[in-house]
Image (cartoon, grey):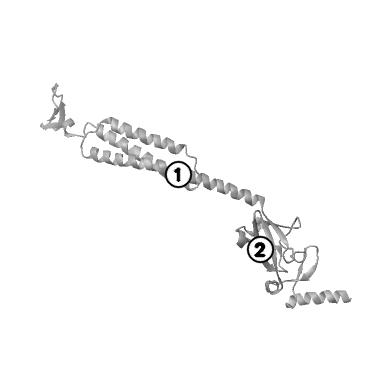
Amino acid sequence: MKRLSSSKRVVNNVVKGEIEWELRPGGMLVQKRNVGDASSGPMIKIKVSHGSYHHDITVAAQSTFGDLKKVLAQETGLEPKEQRLLFQGKEKDDEECLHMVGVKDMSKVVLLEDPASKERKLEEMKGNQSVVKACEEVAKVRAEVDKLSVKVVALEAIVRGGTKVAEKEFLVLTELLMVQLLQLDTIEADGEAKVQRRVEVRRVQGLVDTLDNLKARNSSPFSSSCNAVSVNTKWEAFESGVGSLTAPVPLPSSTRITQDWEVFD
C-alpha cells in the first residue's frame, strides 16, 4: 500500500507541475532535465575529432549527445541528422546523457558524417557540376546564334526594302542555324541548363522560320514592279442583260490581257 501511495504521489506531482519525470534508455525513471538546469550545471570541454579537423566544444556536463550535435552543427555545418557521434568506439543515441556514459572533461568523441548524407551530397555536387558545364555549353551556342541573328535581321531589312537577294544567302544562314540546333541537341542538361537549352532551341527555330518567309517573299514574282502583270477586264452591256464572255485573241508576248463581256436581252 505504501508503494502504491508513493506512485500516486509521483503522478500527482507530475500533474501539479512540482516535479516532471522522464524515462531514460533502459527503463530508468529520472527527473526531467530542463534546458536551464543543464546550462546552470558544471561545464566540461570535449575534444571532438572530425576527420583531420579537431574541435574543442564546451557544453554542460548533463547535456545529451543530441545537444552536442546541435553545437557541432554550428562548428562543422553538418546538420544533427547528418552526424554520428562515437564514444569509446560505440555510436551514441541523441537521448543518451554525456555524464551517464562516462563523458568527462577533456574526453574524446569522434564525429562521423552519415554515409547516406555524404553520398547524397556527392551526388548533388556532381549534379551541380554537370549543370554548370551544360550552362557553359549552352552559352557558347547562344553566342553563335547572336551573331547569326544579326545577319538575319540585316537580310530581312534588305528584302523588305524591295532589293532582291541571292538565294544562297538564305541557304547559308539556314544551314548555320541548323548546325547550332544540332549542337544544342547534343547537350545533356538538367535543371536550369535544360531551361536555357529549350529557350535557345525555340530561338533558333524562330530564326529559321523567318528565313523561310523571307526566301519566299524574295522569290515571289510579285515582289518587284518589273515582274508585275497587269490584268484588265472590259465589260459590254447588251439589252438581254445576260453576260457573255468572248474568248480573247491570243497575244504572243504582251503582258496585258483584255477580256470582253457582252450582255444580251
The residue that mark 1 highlights is 136
Cα–Cα gap, marks 1 and 2: 43 Å
In the picture, measured across the screen, residue 127 lies left or right of residue 80, that is: left
In the picture, measured across the screen, residue 56 lies left or right of residue 239, that is: right
Could you say which quadrant of the image residue 141 lies in?
top left
Amino acid type of the residue that numbered disc 2 sits on in the rendered structure:
Asp
The percent position of residue 60, horizontal first and vertical second, equals 70, 69
Q: Residue at x 60, y 62 (%)?
A: 74
In the picture, measured across the screen, residue 153 lies left or right of residue 48, that is: left
In the picture, measured across the screen, residue 248 lies left or right of residue 180, that is: left
The percent position of residue 230, horizontal first and vertical second, equals 15, 32
Determine crowd level at label 2: few under 14, some 14-19, many 20+ residues with C-alpha closer than 10 A. Answer: some
Mark closer to the chain start, 1 or 2: 2
State the count of labels: 2
Q: Which element is circle 2 on?
A: strand
Could you say which quadrant of the image residue 226 lies in?
top left
Q: Residue at x 66, y 63 (%)?
A: 56
The percent position of residue 13, horizontal first and vertical second, equals 77, 77
Amino acid type of the residue that numbered disc 1 sits on in the rendered structure:
Glu
| Residue 194 seen in the current view | no
Determine crowd level at label 1: few under 14, some 14-19, many 20+ residues with C-alpha closer than 10 A. Answer: few
35 vs 145: above or below: below
Q: Give me the disc on residue 56.
A: 2
